[in-house]
Amino acid sequence: GQNIDQPTEMTATEGAIVQINCTYQTSGFNGLFWYQQHAGEAPTFLSYNVLDGLEEKGRFSSFLSRSKGYSYLLLKELQMKDSASYLCAGMDSNYQLIWGAGTKLIIKP
Amino acid sequence: DGGITQSPKYLFRKEGQNVTLSCEQNLNHDAMYWYRQDPGQGLRLIYYSQIVNDFQKGDIAEGYSVSREKKESFPLTVTSAQKNPTAFYLCAIGDRDGSGANVLTFGAGSRLTVL
């Protein structure tokens, strides 16, 4: 079956670095997405990886290892506004997205 | 909300009633999607449409219906056959970004509560 696993909740301190992990099992693979979702709001696109390696976008970076079925989202210089849920989604061979349940990130001062 | 408008934002329904959630976009995108979000679960695809007058069932289409009579509109009807309709409903459009990824842009969502 197809599955996305990510931790349910994480806590970090303002100004610190946090890494949110995601493991995936999909029928075929056409990329791995990360979205951010603030409580009660719509998800917004953060990153897309289809090749192995690290993609950096400002304070946020995303890493992919296709051989391990593994990705992580790295958030640096954490700010209070980064408190949100982070959704990992894998795209299968039919270009359908398989979504994880999301990781709720709590930032403490 | 990136040119996608969902309404209503909150909706209450009595058991046995059908309700229709609106999704309108002015970005001229062909692909539109409806997802359902429940606590502790990933987004689940209800229906999607790649072109006007055509739509496909997603993973949890039972108890739902859609239409795509116009490119800019993709309404979702939650019928009385849907046994557990209380959820957060998200409409999205799909578009390819510079890297070729099919990126979804979501509307603000509609929260349906069955009383």
Image: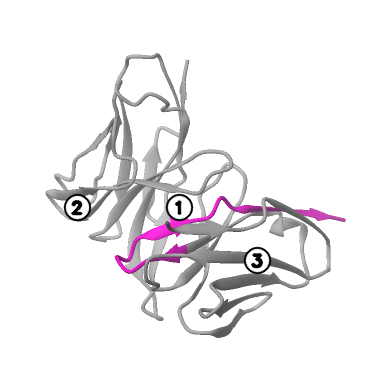
User: Is disc 3 in contact with disc 1, using a CB cutoff of under 8 Å?
Assistant: no
Measured Cα–Cα span from mark 3 to mark 2: 38 Å
Point out the frontmost of discs 3 and 2: 3
The location of residue A49, given as percent across then percent down, is 49, 77
Tag shown at residue B104: none
Q: CA distance from mark 3 to mark 1?
A: 28 Å
Residue A95, quarter of the rendered image = bottom left
**Is residue A80 left or right of B19 when viewed as pictured?**
right
Q: Quadrant of residue B26?
A: bottom left
Q: Earlier in the sequence, mark 1 or mark 2?
A: 1
> In the image, which disc is placed on residue B71?
2
> Which residue position holds label 1?
B1
Q: CA distance from mark 1 to mark 2?
A: 18 Å
Q: Amino acid at mark 2?
A: Lys
Q: Are marks 3 and 2 on the same chain?
A: no
Q: Chain of mark 3?
A: A
Q: Is residue A59 magenta?
A: no
In the image, what residue occupies the spot 56% across and 50% down?
A101
Residue type (three-letter) at the residue carrying disc 1 = Asp
Residue A49, compared with residue B106, is above or below; it is below
Q: Nearer the viewer, residue B50 or A94?
A: A94
Q: Is residue B105 left or right of residue B50?
A: right
Query: The residue under label 3 is which amino acid type?
Result: Asn
> SS of the residue at dot 3?
strand
Q: Residue A55, position in %: x, y?
A: 57, 82
Q: Secondary structure at mark 1?
A: loop
What's drawn in magenta, residue-wise?
A: A90-109
Q: Residue furthest right?
A: A109
Left or right of A55: which side holds B30?
left
Numbered badge on residue A21: 3
